[in-house]
Each structure stands twice: as structure tokens, then as C-alpha cells.
Image (spheres, grey):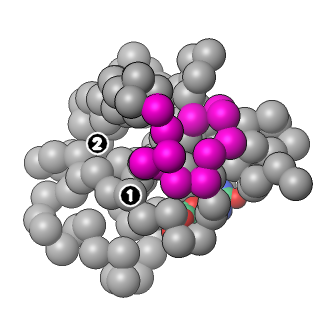
Amino acid sequence: MATIFSRIIQGEIPCYKIAEDERFFAFLDINPLAKGHTLVVPKKEVDYIFQLGDEELGQMMVFAKKVAQAIEKALPCKRIGVAVIGLEVPHAHIHLVPITTEGDLDFKKPHLKLTPEEFLAVQDKITKMF
Ligand code: 5GP
């Protein structure tokens, strides 16, 4: 059965898309730690990021870098924090989270509840920066 992320990539489930190329896809996390929290996923269904081949993993990081640079330009933050968790969705992904302090990357802290209008505004700000 297709993962929830494959269904998002295929357009079966809606998302706030940030960027896409032939191999990778980036979209806003629905349960964000901060405005601009984005997930980068390979289109190929692989459970765990370190199951990707060396070349594909490198390409994924280069794609994530472009997305991170756009987020950084679009939103106030000091850095883009990078995390790999993968305990909830068995489809490799990188979390990109705008941060100002270490604690901003704490996945145990309360997540934001954004309205569709807020998600759209964040999506618009980031996608304009490519
Ligand atoms: P992890 O697998 O890294 O522990 O967590 C998966 C992440 O995917 C979570 O941050 C969660 O909010 C996000 N997520 C799960 N389902 C969906 C979804 O249907 N849409 C979006 N945009 N994000 C999702």
C-alpha cells in the first residue's frame, strides 16, 4: 500500500507544496513546530533515509539545501534546523524547521495549529524565494 507521503506526492491527498523535481518533493508539515516547517521526501518509496543509495542521499540533501535557503529568506529565523525522525511515517523524509534557539527543534514541545489561510501565506512567502 502507498504511504501517506506517496499519496500526497501523487496529489491524492492535498498538501501545501513548496517545491518538486524529478526525484524529490517538499511540502509543509501539517503539524508544524514553527511556521515554515517543511518535509523533504524522495518520490521513491523508501522507509528509512539511510536506506537510500549514496548518490540519491546526496541529491536529496542538495534539494533540501535549496528549500532551506528559500525558507530562510522567507521567514525570520537564525538557521534552518535539520532533523530526521521517521517514527511516524515509514517514508524517508527530512524535517526543515526555522529555528532561533536549540529548543525550537524540540519535537516534544507543543506544535502549532495553523489555519488554512496561515498555511497558504507561509507557502506563498517561501515559494516566492526560489
Ligand atoms: P516522523 O515520521 O518524522 O516522526 O513524523 C512525520 C511527520 O509528518 C510529522 O511531523 C507529521 O506532522 C507529518 N505528517 C504526517 N501526516 C501528514 C500529512 O498527511 N500531511 C502533512 N503535510 N504532514 C504530515
> What kind of residue is marked 1?
Val
Is residue 46 in the magenta section?
Answer: yes
From the image, tell me which residue sits under label 2.
75
Q: Position of residue 35 (x, y in %)?
A: 40, 55
Q: Does the magenta stretch include residue 63?
A: no
Q: Residue at x 46, y 32 (%)?
A: 53
Residue 51: % across, % down: 50, 46
Local crowd size for mark 1, using a 10 Å CA cut-off: few (<14), some (14–19), many (≥20): few
Q: Tag 1, which secondary structure? A: loop
Query: Is the residue marked 1 within 8 Å of ligand 1, measured from its CB?
Result: yes
Q: Which residue is tagged 1?
A: 84
Residue 116 in the image: state x and y as whole percent: 65, 54
Residue stretch rendered in magenta on the structure = 42-53
For the residue pair 66 and 57, the one nearer the viewer reads as 57
Q: Does 84 sit above or below residue 109?
A: above
Is the residue 66 above or below the residue 93 in the image?
A: above
